Amino acid sequence: MKFDHDTTYYHKFPDEVFDVEFSFTSDLDTGETIAASSHASIWDSEENNKTASIISNVSASSTSVSFNIKNMKADETYETKIVGRTSSNNVYIHYLTIEVFEGESFNTKVADFTANSYVTIPEANEYIRNKYGHSSLWDTLDTEGKKRLLVEAAENMNVFNYVGEKYYDAQPLEFPRDDHEVITGYCATPITSKSFKHTSLKSSTYGKYPQNYWKYGSCHLVDDNEVGEIASSNVTSGIVHMKSDFSASLTTSTEFKVFAPIDRNVKHAQIEQALFLIEKKGSNTLYNYKDIGAQEVEIGDTRVRFANSMSGSKIPISSIAKKLLSRWIRKTLRLARA
């Protein structure tokens, strides 16, 4: 990453490694070059020198100083001092403030009270690759960036007035709704720390429950207030396997609720909204101005005013996402006097 010498603030996530190249071009006199004795150092917010643990591989070129930054703590702010010594024995000093953000909490467990996404990163990657086939801005994002974009997209989807009610009043996302497919019962053997059997989770009817039907769904332990994400299911035997162990000990007295996966159209709507946010696809068309909440657009001598333009909402919504969600969006009926 080449830092703009006019910018003094940057942010990163804890796991990110910055390859810094700081240019002194604007400082140097004609013929001056940066000397090998140039260096960089860093302090945390309590003024502790953290150079040895954070900065490495410092080197100098003719006009810049390069180094690596890593091993930074979340929710901490650091000040970096970059000293450029020149062939003319001049010294130029610049400071950078780097704020480290905590990684995004990412929860795709269906109906969990802290869920903030309907899709996983692999699901989003697969959908985008299979549908669009070409590289896009999405591919330039790291995992943390994709998480944040998907979380924002899921929040955007809360703008609509959906048919029915949330399954749980306290759930943060609009889905699952109160008509969602849910199996309730008590765990049956064989039981492990992350798997159990139940006859309602299997079917002998051809095509009713394909293999891995419950995958990406969730299992709620009613009395233990614990939610697990389902990694796989065998509909022949009626056994579901969680992604990780439950902390509670499963017995035949353990009551559960198994939630089917969120409908794929809801998941695809979230992905399309994420793509829309990053790419603003088709923003040069009039109807996409409406999608992003515009009430009126003026181009040259032409002025267009949109009817029912998101009721003044400032949340930009993808037209593709809205179409995918249309079966759940409540339709309004306007009445007029006779």
Image (spheres, rainbow, N blue to C red):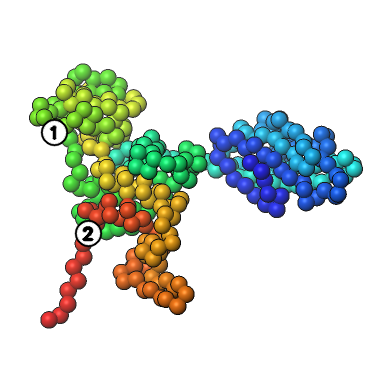
Residue type (three-letter) at the residue carrying disc 1: Lys
Residue at 86% x, 45% y: name it: 31
Q: Which element type, helix, strand or loop, lies under badge 1?
A: loop
Q: Amino acid at mark 2?
A: Arg
Q: Residue at x 38, y 73 (%)?
A: 304
Q: Where is residue 132, by image quadrant?
A: top left
Is 191 on the left-hand or right-hand side of 291?
left
Q: Is any part of residue 186 visible from this angle?
A: no
Extreme residue toward the left, this view: 205
Name the residue beneath numbered marker 2.
330
Image check: 75 left or right of 195?
right
| SS type, badge 2 | loop
Q: Are marks 2 and 1 in contact (CB under 8 Å)?
A: no
Q: Residue 27, percent across and down?
A: 80, 50
Q: Residue at x 19, y 19 (%)?
A: 189
Quarter of the figure with residue 70: top right
Q: Label 2 crowding class (10 Å Cα cut-off): few <14, some 14-19, many 20+?
A: few
Whole-Å distance between the Cαs marked 2 and 1?
29 Å
Viewer-nearest residue: 195 or 3: 3
Q: Position of residue 234 (x, y in %)?
A: 21, 24
Residue at the far right in the pictured view: 88
Q: Quadrant of the C terminus?
A: bottom left
Number of dots carrying numbers: 2
Q: Which residue is mark 1?
A: 208
Against 103, is 200 above or below?
above
Query: Badge 1: few (under 14), some or many (20 or more) residues near its Cα, within 10 Å?
Result: few
Residue 157 locus on image (x, y percent): 34, 53
Residue at left offset 34%, top offset 71%: 306
Viewer can see residue 330? yes
